[in-house]
Amino acid sequence: MFVFWNQAKNVKRKDNPIKLMRQCGQCNKSAMFFECEKTDEFKLYGAIALKFDRTTVMQCGECLAVYKAEDDPDVQKHMEHRKQAEDAAQAKESERAEAERRREEAKRQEEIRKKEAKKQKEIDDELADLKRELGQ
Ligand SMILES: [Zn+2]
């Protein structure tokens, strides 16, 4: 069971949250728990926000009680899976970017080569003209 923390306050459900079925210690129901982000503000004179602490919590879908999530092995397992999926996606993206970069570079080199070939041809033509003129 999760470690009960407190009632919902400054709690926002995450996009694509981790979901777990658990017995809730507060409402005693078997409920779906959702991964949320809890933001705690530390205020100066109760007015100026000094700093924000963001914590991942699991929230009971029934009574909205909030539980600490980070120490929970099941949540950690889910987070680990998600991180692996993200890393894999990241690696794929870098690979794609690298292939793109290589393609761009090859194109650039090809353009330089063409330009040089064209310049060389112009020189050759000029020389040929010159020779023709001299030959007359
Ligand atoms: Zn509950």
Image: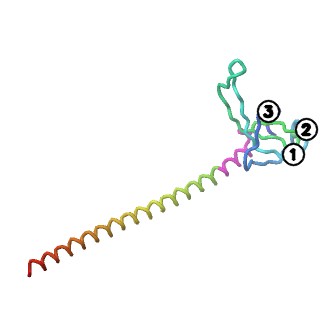
- Residue 62 shown left or right of residue 35 in the figure: right
User: In the rendered structure, are the residues bearing label 2 and label 1 in contact, judged by CB atoms less than 8 Å apart?
Assistant: yes
The kind of secondary structure the magenta stretch mainly shows is: helix
Q: Mark 1 points at which residue?
A: 31
Amino acid on which disc 1 is placed: Ala
Label 1: element kind: strand
CA separation in Å, label 2 and label 3: 17 Å
Q: Mark 3 points at which residue?
A: 9
CA separation in Å, label 3 and label 1: 19 Å
Residue sitting nearer the eye, 134 or 75 = 134
Residue sitting nearer the eye, 90 or 21 = 90
Amino acid on which disc 3 is placed: Lys
**Within the magenta stretch, is there residue 33?**
no
Question: How did the renderer colour the structure?
Answer: rainbow
Q: Any mark on residue 116, and which? A: none
**Image: 65 above or below 50:** below
Label 2: element kind: loop
Q: Mark 2 points at which residue?
A: 27
Q: Is the residue at mark 1 in contact range of ligand 1, meaning its CB lies under 8 Å from it?
A: yes
Q: Position of residue 123 (x, y in %)?
A: 21, 71
Q: Is the residue at mark 2 in contact range of ligand 1, meaning its CB lies under 8 Å from it?
A: yes
Label 3: element kind: loop
Residue at (43, 62) in percent of width and height: 104
